Image: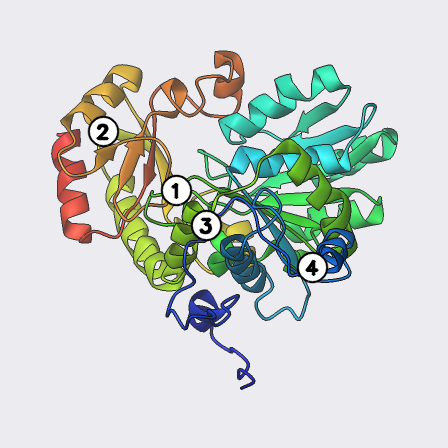
Amino acid sequence: MKQAPLTGFSSVCVHAGHEQDPQYAHLTPIYASSTYVYDSAEQGMHRFSGKEDGYIYTRWDSPNFREAEEKIAALEGFGLSLPLKAKLHASGMGALSTLFFSNLTAGDKVISHYSLYGGTDEMLRKTLPPLGIETIFIDMQDLNKTEEIIKADPSIKMMYLETPANPTLKCVDLEALCGLAQQYKLISAVDNTFATPYLQQPFAYGTDYVFHSTTKFLNGHGTAIGGVLVGKDIEMMRGPVEKMARMLGANSNPFDSFLLTQGIKTLEVRMERHCHNAMEVAGFLDGHPAVARVNYLGLADHPDFMIASRQMKHAGAMLSFELKDGLEAGKRFIDRLQMCLRAVSLGTCDTLICHPASMTHYSVPKELREKYDITDGLIRVSVGIESVTDILNDIEQALA
């Protein structure tokens, strides 16, 4: 029976990518097999040559990978009528490695902005330069300066964007920057981890790639590490990107893929609650005497409020805030928490609170952290889906 078109985001979350199991299991079983068999030598030849679709080896593909990949591609392309292909990885850093190594070679440059996830920043600053790939970091909110630098340096091949950025929640203008990338024939890539495809769809603005750490909101429960790279050039995704992912050995595994697929099914309902709670928490912190500033895109005084309002459905679940008494106040606050959890990562059902300067951005030199507004007193909060009253009560007593 032909399936009716899915018109709602949650319907895509639940049903996209799923194929009826031959044994009629409700959910796709976990295919705990390293390899697959063939009916004949000819069938094996056809699968290796690509003439016949089918599974060969789990480093290459698995029914569990494919369901998650097709679900994520459908969500990133929801309402856009744009064919997309996703490649699942063992981690976000694995997906980033595939992105860079399949698109860049020695002599190429990347242009990016301040305040990136610590692992991304370290890869761009320390891992890629010895391979002959350099990164130019600038304030990409200055569109004129960005265009000047691109025009002046033909070795710039890729524009890498993270919006909202981790942990300052700074935003860049996707429409304007992806337009510049297209104008100057640059490859563009956007980290959409914080926003998720429910709140923001970078492909609507012309990006070539979207990246996620699926560990975060897509999984939603903190049960599995993962990453995904989604591209609109299907030939590129099936060719160099697929080949590089296989050669790096950065593939996911069937169990983590299964957990990811189950997590995505509740993405919309979780994000609605995350966003509601985050707005309440931001409003509380914004008026607290111990807090110097709050970084939340839903507050009208955030410098990027208008950019976020144009390209995001809601301000999201992430926020950070600066305590007036700096590092010592931050340590006291984190130590006093009773319900909210002291942990890195984000996007889980429970509220996670961390200190970026000593945790997620420890590898970033202090002078650069401060240049990015990642100060010693900055606290990052991934607001969970608990009762917002309990979240506020815990934060209030910890600040007392």
Furthest-bottom residue in this view: 1
Q: Which of 222 and 8 is in front in this view?
A: 222
Tag of residue 224? 1
Q: What residue type is labelled 1?
A: Ala
- Identify the mark nearer the N-term, 1 or 2: 1
Q: Look at mark 2 in the image and give the residue it sits on.
A: 290
In the image, 118: left or right of 383? right
Q: For the residues marked 4 and 3, what is the alpha-carbon distance in whole angstroms?
A: 29 Å
Tag of residue 167? none
Q: Residue at x 25, y 45 (%)?
A: 350
Q: Which residue is drawn at 70% across and 37% down?
A: 244
Q: For the residues marked 1 and 4, what is the alpha-carbon distance in whole angstroms?
A: 36 Å
The structure's colour scheme is: rainbow
- Identify the mark nearer the N-term, 1 or 3: 1
Q: What residue type is labelled 2?
A: Ala
Q: Which of 3 and 272 is in front in this view?
A: 3
| Residue 283 on image: x %, y % | 28, 47
Q: Which of 3 and 200 is in front in this view?
A: 3
* Mark 1 residue crowding within 10 angstroms, few (<14) / some (14–19) / many (20+): many
| Residue 71 on image: x %, y % | 52, 61
Q: Which amino acid does label 4 sit on?
A: Ser
Q: Residue at x 68, y 61 (%)?
A: 53
- Identify the mark nearer the N-term, 3 or 2: 3
Q: Look at mark 3 in the image and give the residue it sits on.
A: 257
* Mark 3 residue crowding within 10 angstroms, few (<14) / some (14–19) / many (20+): many
| Quarter of the image where the C terminus is located | top left
